[in-house]
Amino acid sequence: MNSLEVSIRPCEECDMLAITAIYRHHVLNSPATFEIEPPGIREMMARRARLLEGGFPYLVAERGDEVIGYAYAGPYRPRPAYRFTVENSVYVRPGNLRQGIGQRLLTALLADCAQKGFRQVIAVIGDSANQASISLHEQMGFRLVGTLRAVGFKFDRWYDSVLMQRELGGVDSHW
């Protein structure tokens, strides 16, 4: 693989230090996540373990031997009727944005979700001004299903939460 090539692969435990650093940056500098305090490595490892134990996909984007992004799907809601619906998350390391990494991660994540039998994917996007994330999801076939106004308070201001949805197939829908 040349130094510019990006590969997508399942997340391994040894990737968690890089993932924790990527997420820390987004928590401290972006309304993309409504988390206020960045979780430490132990918490991030526990979160990953819970997702994997639940049969959810967790992927990383790697350039050379460096993790430059990650994506995962997790339960949308805890009640059993939601078991075929997941919520997705995609984060890219600063300095690697707008290079198609998020799209590659999300493409692979959607394929994994479909293969695992999930049928609906919900994107909960922090900040209605986050055009990069909204556009990424639109390009990947997600539809806007609503905006929750001023539901998150971070950086001394209120932020919206944008809800987008994509059907993976195999269900009757109202689309």
Image (spheres, rainbow, N blue to C red):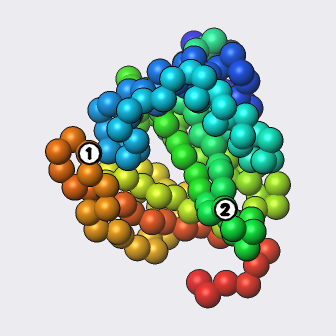
| Residue 2 in the image, given as x and y percentages of width and height | 62, 13
Using the image as rendered, state which of residue 156 and residue 124 is in the foreground.
156
SS assignment at label 2: loop
Using the image as rendered, state which of residue 28 and residue 93 is in the foreground.
28
Name the residue type under label 1.
Answer: Lys
Mark 2 nearby-residue class (10 Å; few <14, some 14–19, many ≥20): few
In the picture, which quadrant includes the C terminus?
A: bottom right
| Residue 23 in the image, given as x and y percentages of width and height | 46, 30
| Of callouts 1 and 2, the N-terminal one | 2
Residue beneath the point at 31% across and 55% down:
152
Residue beneath the point at 28% across and 68% down:
149
As drawn, the label of residue 154 is: 1
In the picture, which quadrant includes the N terminus?
A: top right
Residue beneath the point at 40% across and 41% down:
35
Any part of residue 169 in sight: no
Q: Determine which residue is flagged by label 2.
A: 78
